[in-house]
């Protein structure tokens, strides 16, 4: 593997520089005086921002973009091996790094590098940790998989020993990371277009945990079924969190305000501590916050900063995000949930907020996930008063005819739910306008572009 010398800035080329994670790495290298070049298939606010910082960006990916003076190339898993730029870099023998490999090398430049992993909750927990570090004035470098208002985007380049990033298990990319502290929020069955099943997923997280140095720290959900298997033979320090009494950090006496924000008693080593209030919704975020508290105390951050940071954290975009109220009085919330466990957590949070009927406009994400978890999706969604199911968002996949949104509707209805399929967003909007009443709650839900339904409704 090519090793970047961060003390000797050189010329780097990013294939797919406009992506949320690639752009963050590009910005870090720009701050370190590297000559940053790159390409993407279209212009965006992100590419415009990088240009303003000095990056040179090509729109369109052709072999002529890869010049002999490039010192190394960074690419994402989304780059097809037949891509002209990719083939040109290989032919010219230019060193190449994946996005994850570069991020892993970036982490080596920080004493306190924190990687936040888990099937669900990574972005929200990274947001919580970011707010705490900012409140404590640690001047951290932050790389997050969503847009965070507190840092004005998805990246913040600091000048301290603190670095925090998300660590995604898909394609085992996080195995290239080099953290000093890791969080494992949960381990669930997902990304079944890559993993064969839960056993392989658990092994992936175990390998990730084994990346920690002996003097490092693993903060892990102690309520997980697979916790023992992941932590076996680890030499680093281990702290557990969760709701069960045998965890090092746990919560009790959880109460919710009228907007669904929880307050709970923090219990450390079975001793009651502070009352903590969150601006995030749901019991799942109570659990997420425990991991952030544990890491913060390990880093020596005082409780005043921890409490203030958690209270200031309103979560990243598309995480139970209140978008507004329509002219007909319908409350619009948007949420990124695209896995049955995430959906169940979001709907549980919704039930703690005032509303009349609960509507969900759901866009399934990928055929593989929908097919593999069809029964679990239906079980999670059946509690809604109304489920409006859009066509499946293909993302990186092709429709093989194996599963459809109508299959999901039929399964929900067979369990006593109330689901309808719509082939386009305009039909969903028209149905909502005719049938949703004042004080009904509509959640646009999914990892695709279903949020456009709520945006459009609010403009009418």
Image (tube, rainbow, N blue to C red):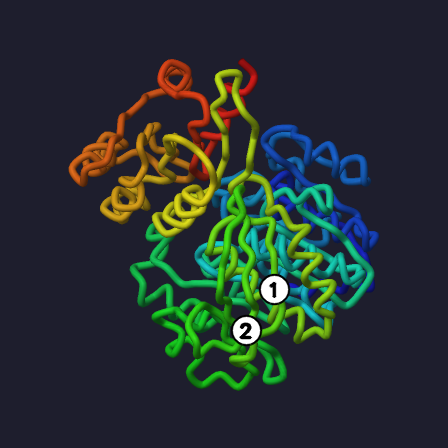
**Residue 319 coordinates in the image, percent (x, y):** 53, 43
Taking the view exactly as shown, the residue that stands out farthest to the left is: 414
Q: CA distance from mark 1 to mark 2?
A: 9 Å
Viewer can see residue 406 = yes
**Residue 126 coordinates in the image, percent (x, y):** 61, 56
Depth check: 324 or 352 in front?
A: 352
Horizontal side, residue 11 vs residue 116: left or right: right
Residue 88, picture quadrant: top right
Q: Which residue is mark 1?
A: 275
Horizontal side, residue 164 vs residue 242: left or right: right
Horizontal side, residue 273 vs residue 199: left or right: right
Residue 267's disc number: 2
Q: Is residue 200 above or below residue 424?
A: below
Q: Is residue 101 above or below residue 294?
A: above
Depth check: 356 or 408 in front?
A: 356
Depth check: 255 or 432 in front?
A: 255
Which residue shows up at 36% across the image and 54% down it?
190
């Amino acid at each position: 593997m090519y090793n970047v010398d961060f003390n000797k800035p050189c010329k780097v080329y990013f294939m797919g520089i406009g992506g949320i994670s690639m752009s963050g790495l590009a910005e870090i290298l720009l701050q370190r005086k590297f000559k940053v070049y790159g390409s993407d298939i279209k212009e965006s606010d992100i590419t415009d921002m990088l240009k303003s910082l000095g990056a040179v960006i090509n729109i369109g990916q052709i072999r002529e973009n890869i010049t002999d003076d490039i010192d190394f190339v960074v690419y994402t898993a989304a780059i097809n091996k037949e891509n002209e730029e990719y083939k040109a870099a290989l032919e010219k023998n230019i060193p190449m790094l994946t996005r994850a490999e570069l991020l892993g090398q970036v982490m080596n430049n920080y004493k306190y590098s924190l990687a936040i992993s888990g099937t669900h909750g990574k972005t929200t927990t990274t947001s919580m940790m970011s707010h705490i570090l900012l409140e404590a004035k640690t001047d951290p470098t932050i790389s997050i998989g969503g847009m965070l208002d507190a840092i004005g985007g998805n990246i913040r380049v600091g000048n301290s020993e603190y670095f925090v990033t998300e660590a995604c298990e898909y394609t085992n990319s996080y195995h290239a990371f080099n953290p000093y502290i890791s969080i494992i929020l949960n381990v669930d069955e997902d990304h079944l277009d890559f993993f064969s099943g839960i056993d392989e997923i658990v092994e992936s997280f175990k390998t990730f945990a084994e990346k920690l140095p002996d003097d490092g720290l693993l903060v892990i959900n102690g309520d997980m079924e697979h916790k023992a298997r992941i932590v076996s033979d680890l030499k680093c320090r281990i702290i557990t969190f969760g709701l069960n009494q045998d965890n090092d950090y746990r919560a009790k006496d959880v109460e919710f305000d009228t907007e669904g924000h929880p307050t709970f008693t923090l219990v450390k080593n079975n001793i009651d501590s502070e009352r903590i209030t969150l601006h995030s919704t749901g019991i799942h975020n109570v659990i997420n916050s425990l991991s952030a508290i544990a890491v913060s105390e390990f880093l020596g951050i005082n409780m005043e900063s921890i409490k203030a940071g958690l209270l200031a954290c309103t979560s990243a975009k598309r995480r139970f995000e209140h978008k507004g109220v329509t002219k007909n009085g319908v409350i619009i919330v948007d949420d990124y949930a695209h896995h049955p466990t995430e959906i169940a957590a979001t709907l549980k949070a919704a039930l703690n907020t005032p509303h009349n009927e609960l509507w969900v406009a759901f866009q399934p994400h990928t055929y593989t996930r929908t097919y593999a978890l069809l029964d679990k999706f239906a079980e999670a969604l059946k509690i809604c008063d109304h489920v409006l199911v859009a066509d499946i968002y293909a993302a990186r996949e092709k429709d093989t005819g194996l599963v459809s949104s109508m299959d999901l509707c039929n399964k929900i209805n067979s369990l006593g739910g109330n689901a309808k399929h719509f082939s386009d967003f305009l039909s969903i909007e028209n149905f909502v306008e005719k049938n949703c009443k004042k004080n009904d709650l509509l959640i646009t839900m999914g990892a695709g572009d279903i949020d456009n339904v709520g945006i459009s409704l609010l403009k009418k």
